[in-house]
Amino acid sequence: MKKTHIVVISALLLLMLFVLGSFLVKGKQQDSLSALARKNAEALVRDHSQTAGSPDAKVVIVEFMDPGCETCRAFDPFIKQMMAAYPGKIRLVIRYAPLHHGADFMCAVLEAARKQGKYWETLQLMYDTQPQWADHHNPQPDRIWQYLPRLGLDLKKLKKDLDDPAISRLIAQDMADARALDVRKTPGFFVNGKPLVRFGYEQLQALIEGELRANY
């Protein structure tokens, strides 16, 4: 056998071993995170968690998010499209994992706005204006006050509600749950308790549609 053939075959074998090794590692990671999610199932959804969609939906997406996260912002319309494509079959649960500077403050603003029935409008406003207040090199979360009047919120009441210790406890609980579930970056997705290990739009869609087929 020619030397060049041996080199090519060796290279192909090494590539196959690498692919197989990567597959096995990802499989073990999937099993490990799935087991962790099952062990900490109560940490996925809390009574205080904000939800959207039918309460009778058989597919539940839990998203650990950060209002200052660019990827969370990018996935927001994708999640809405999935829910619109399967009306009444998907429910979204929002959990907090404020990992960026000032994001805990933004989560508190969301909860204060929730008291005025403006949760989803405020979250959308935060995403729409994210480039203005969430620059990672120079975050300025206080800039959100420039935009909140657009929603007709009672800002005086909102500022007072920010001091509600229940909001701080709520955010702290979400952070503790994120750690228990090994959520290290945002957004962190779980679909019917199954973690999204390989991150991406197609992977999330496949996980959601797999649960839809299994439950409907």
Image (spheres, rainbow, N blue to C red):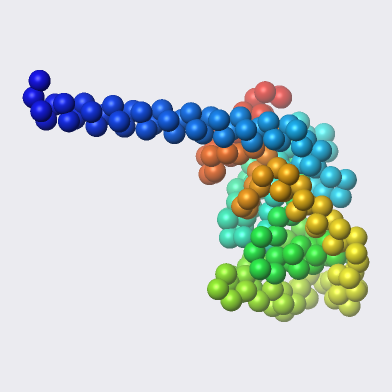
Quadrant including the N terminus: top left
- What residue sits 57% from the left and 34% below the top? 29
Q: Is residue 208 above or below residue 185?
A: above
In the rendered image, the residue lying farthest to the top is 1
- Give how far across and how far down residue 96 sits, in percent: 74, 54
Quarter-wise, where is residue 146 in the image? bottom right
- Give how far across and how far down residue 59 sits, in percent: 72, 33
- Relative horizontal placement of residue 210, taking residue 25 as reference (left or right): right
Quadrant including the C terminus: top right
Is residue 37 visible in the rendered image? The answer is: yes
Q: Is residue 200 above or below residue 7?
A: below
- Relative horizontal placement of residue 158, taking residue 176 as reference (left or right): right
Q: Is residue 178 above or below residue 66?
A: above
- What residue sits 61% from the left and 52% below the top? 185
- What residue sits 77% from the left and 51% below the top? 176
In the rendered image, the residue lying farthest to the left is 2
- Give how far across and how far down residue 76 sits, in percent: 64, 53
Quarter-wise, where is residue 43 in the image? top right
Q: Nearer the viewer, residue 91 or 66?
A: 66
